[in-house]
Amino acid sequence: MQGITNISSISGPIISAPVSQPQNQGQLGGLSASTQMTPDAIRNLMLQQMSSGATANPAPISSFSLQSATPEQSAEPRSKLQNFQTAVQTLGDRILHALVSTKTASLRNSAAKHNGEVTMKVSQVTGSIKNAILKDTNTSGGCCEALSAHWMKARAEGSNLGEQLFQSGTASDKGKLNKETMQSVAQLQTDGMVGYDQEAITEGWLRSNNIESPYRELGALSRVHGQTSRGRNGAAELAAKIVDNGPKTSLLKKIGLEGPSNAHAVAAAVDGEKVTFFDPNFGEFSFPSKEDFTSWFVQDFWHKSGYDLPKFGLSGEFSIVNLEANH
């Protein structure tokens, strides 16, 4: 899938990381998959390489902001028009966060009838996380790509995102955030925008944390693409691809969704029959079997999330990168 160009100037919390075409599976921007570097080093190298190869007028690839300045640019004087655009964007983001949050209770409650449970109430459209990301126009539209990546990292470490995001070690809408973790989330999302290839930036960050695709074993299954649509079975193909591990018992799933105007990122972990699914807008859900997850995802999640809406939803294309931790 190509990145979105010229999406609405007011982007919302269901909008984030547009999904790019797969990069060379063995390398990322000239960085060997076996290269060992610190997260900061790999980030700086990728940004330098991508900046040198960027087009003169690159299309926006993140929902972060409308022509928002990077930290280096922010010291420059801003025109009245820029200030007005920022105010409009922030207001729009607040409204859309509020609209998406109205779907949270119904969606979470739907898991129980499919033998599932809500195992972590982390959401970027409510409470502390929402308040934090709304303070900066670079993040006010949402951090779904970065939150999904940090969820996979935490899981690979035997931890969970709630423990790392909140000072109490427990996910809570009103809990105090761990500033270091939240800054890492914001930085990764911003890097994707600055580098003009959010997909590659995120995969490089994951690789630096020993999470990468076992593509030699999976072949074409290391990256899969497909279509979603509106209606009751609109997400059936997506659900089937999420639970497909091929020859592997356990895999992490980096999932990109792209609709007519918006894009979003979610994640999953499939361990044998058990499926754990994470959506930055609604939290983490666990199901004892692939069948239970699939029935929930197709019958309830796709509609109750609003992702099947005709214009502002996410019915269109999806991309899944299958990953595993190498610890």
Image (tube, helix red, strand yellow):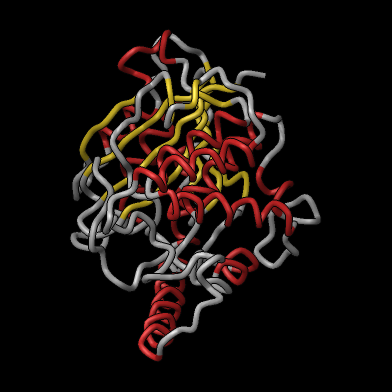
> Could you say which is closer to the camera, residue 327 or residue 165?
327
Q: Residue placed at 56% from the left, 66% from the top?
A: 71
Q: Position of residue 252 (x, y in %)?
A: 51, 28
> Could you say which is closer to the camera, residue 205 or residue 119?
205
Q: Quadrant of the C terminus?
A: top right
Q: Quadrant of residue 50?
A: top left
Q: Residue placed at 47% from the left, 41% from the top?
A: 201
Q: Position of residue 293 (x, y in %)?
A: 43, 34
Residue at the far front in the pictured view: 52
Residue at the far right in the pictured view: 168
> Could you say which is closer to the camera, residue 220 or residue 137?
137
The image shows a total of numbered marks equal to: 0
Horizontal side of 149 relative to 171 (left or right) equals: left
Q: Position of residue 288 (x, y in %)?
A: 53, 28
Q: Position of residue 307 (x, y in %)?
A: 31, 54
Reply above or below: 85 against 288: below
Reply above or below: 206 against 72: above
Horizontal side of 266 relative to 175 (left or right) equals: left
Q: Quadrant of the N terminus?
A: top left
Q: Residue placed at 72% from the left, 61% from the top?
A: 177
Q: Residue placed at 55% from the left, 37% from the top?
A: 205
